[in-house]
Amino acid sequence: MWSNHINYYGDMRTHQLVLTWIEKQLSDGELTVGGRLPAERTLAEQLGVSRTSVREAIRILEALGVVRAGVGSGPEAGTVVISDPTAALGSALRLHVATQHLPIADIVETRVLLESWAAARARADAPELERAAALLDEMDAVGRGSAEADHFLALDVRFHLSLADAAGNAVVSAMMGSLRESIQGYAGKLTANLPDWDTTATRLQAEHRDILAAIRNDDGGHAAKLVAAHIEGYYREAGVRHTAKA
Amino acid sequence: MWSNHINYYGDMRTHQLVLTWIEKQLSDGELTVGGRLPAERTLAEQLGVSRTSVREAIRILEALGVVRAGVGSGPEAGTVVISDPTAALGSALRLHVATQHLPIADIVETRVLLESWAAARARADAPELERAAALLDEMDAVGRGSAEADHFLALDVRFHLSLADAAGNAVVSAMMGSLRESIQGYAGKLTANLPDWDTTATRLQAEHRDILAAIRNDDGGHAAKLVAAHIEGYYREAGVRHTAKA
DNA sequence: TAGGCCATGTGGTCCAACCACATCAACTAC
DNA sequence: GTAGTTGATGTGGTTGGACCACATGGCCTA
């Protein structure tokens, strides 16, 4: 038969072998969130591969939001297991947008889809809604000058993510976050196309409060419609002028 | 002030520097899908970093479905830019499922959400529907024994992806594909819980044809309902027995 | 006892070599 | 002249070893 070496793994590249081992540890529950991977040198010796290959595997896991690497000693050091699906989805989408194989329009459309569903699905008494309400107050407090637009938008993102979280679906939340991240730069530029940021911000806030009120009133269907109109309206207002400049 | 070396990039780690450079090339259109990256050794020299760091960056891009690396010479060799968002999302979701921080139920729910939307959105004359129909014929042709269940399910996946493609949203298609990939192993095990695979497969096929007919009849709303019932019904049938065994 | 200092262990980076692979051109045998 | 072989070339794949920056903690000194 074939080799009886413990390290026979077919055509698999070395770093994939390491990935497979780590994924198995995760599936078997021998590695859990918060736990630490063996040190790179140790792991390399255990698996009979070079440290380089171990590092390549860890880099991939880092990019996928599965681990975090820290130098030095102490609690922040070492490679520890985390769970940040949004990071992976976000950078992936961002890069594919860069290759121009993921149209911005499709991203916006997907955002509307997910966010409408979340609004319809959110429970009226979800604790995330209180955070959302607090964010709205914070947004009222920021100035209405275009200089503060970035600050306002940052809070806006967190508000929408809070609504998504209120639906209680981790996958939808992660996807929502990644969609926002992937078009973050784009959305920022859009504000430059708005004729009057002050007016727009005030309108957005009014719509935000309507959406939140609908959810808290257990009128999911209405909330979903409001959310869709809210998002589409914003991109239409900013986007039309954007294309009109061309 | 600080160093005036051309390679001062703040706290960024070396491989991130390479990633940033490549992402900029993509955004600027200097690198497009189908294009080739400079050879690893060349790129390392150009950017003033080690080949190791270049390779770590490329590994990340590979995991994100942005490039494909091939050894040797000729058209298949070298590191070429591709665009496979599904690969990135799929492996990310799969790993996070392994960490048990993404409930399977949430993935199934999200799948229903996306697929219902796609069914409602698909155009009746979309060319992808012909591929879907061909897949259904192929599924009729495979045996009904449980031994062929894997083959049937593989075609089933492609059928559903074809429907998603018919909606014409690349982001939704990519997410759909990644969701299927992330629970592929899980779905396969479920068939073992079914009392009679033959009967189930025949029923699934009937539902498939109803869905396809509804889309072709331009009745998106009906198609969406059928799809939701189709997916939820399958998981309920297989899943209930699964938990009942415990 | 309080302070500084170094041993230790972590990831971060680099280098130099070697391998396997695929192509292509030059060369050789017929 | 043609067909086949062979080697040069260039690609990613892998390895071992060296050194660095960093953070801790214990030892040693004042």
Image: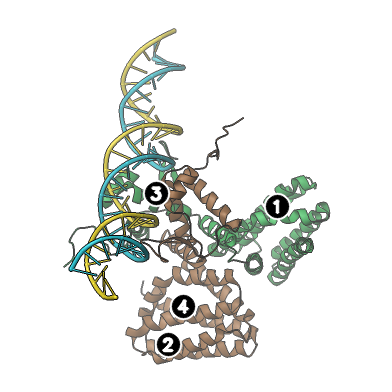
Chain colours: A brown, B green, C yellow, D cyan
Q: Earlier in the sequence, mark 1 or mark 3?
A: 3
Is disc 4 on the same chain as disc 3? no
The subunit carrying tag 3 is B
Question: How far is mark 1 from mark 4, CA to CA?
Answer: 40 Å
Circle 2 residue: A200
Give the CA separation, mark 2 to mark 1: 50 Å
* Residue located beneath label 1 in the image: B153
| Residue found at x 77% / y 58% | B204
Q: Is residue A168 above or below residue A16?
A: below
Chain ID of residue with mark 4: A
Task: Determine the secondary structure under disc 3.
Answer: loop
Q: Residues within 10 Å of mark 4 (few under 14, many from 20)?
A: some
Quarter of the rendering containing residue B240: bottom right
**Secondary structure of the residue carrying numbered label 2:** helix
The amino acid beneath tag 1 is Leu
Are labels 1 and 3 on one chain?
yes
What's the chain of the residue with tag 1? B
Amino acid bearing label 3: Gly
Same chain check for tags 4 and 2: yes
**Quadrant of residue A212 within the rendered picture:** bottom right
Instruction: Quadrant for the C terminus of chain A, please.
Output: bottom left
Q: CA distance from mark 1 to mark 3?
A: 35 Å
Quarter occupied by the N terminus of chain A: top right
Amino acid of disc 2: Thr
Badge 3: residue crowd in 10 Å (few <14, some 14–19, many ≥20): few
Q: What separation in Å lies between label 2 and label 3 (alpha carbons)?
A: 42 Å
The amino acid beneath tag 4 is Tyr
Is residue B222 or residue B19 the one in the foreground?
Answer: B19
Q: Position of residue A204 (x, y in %)?
A: 47, 87
Secondary-structure class at tag 4: helix
Quadrant of res B27: bottom left
Numbered circle sitting on residue A235: 4
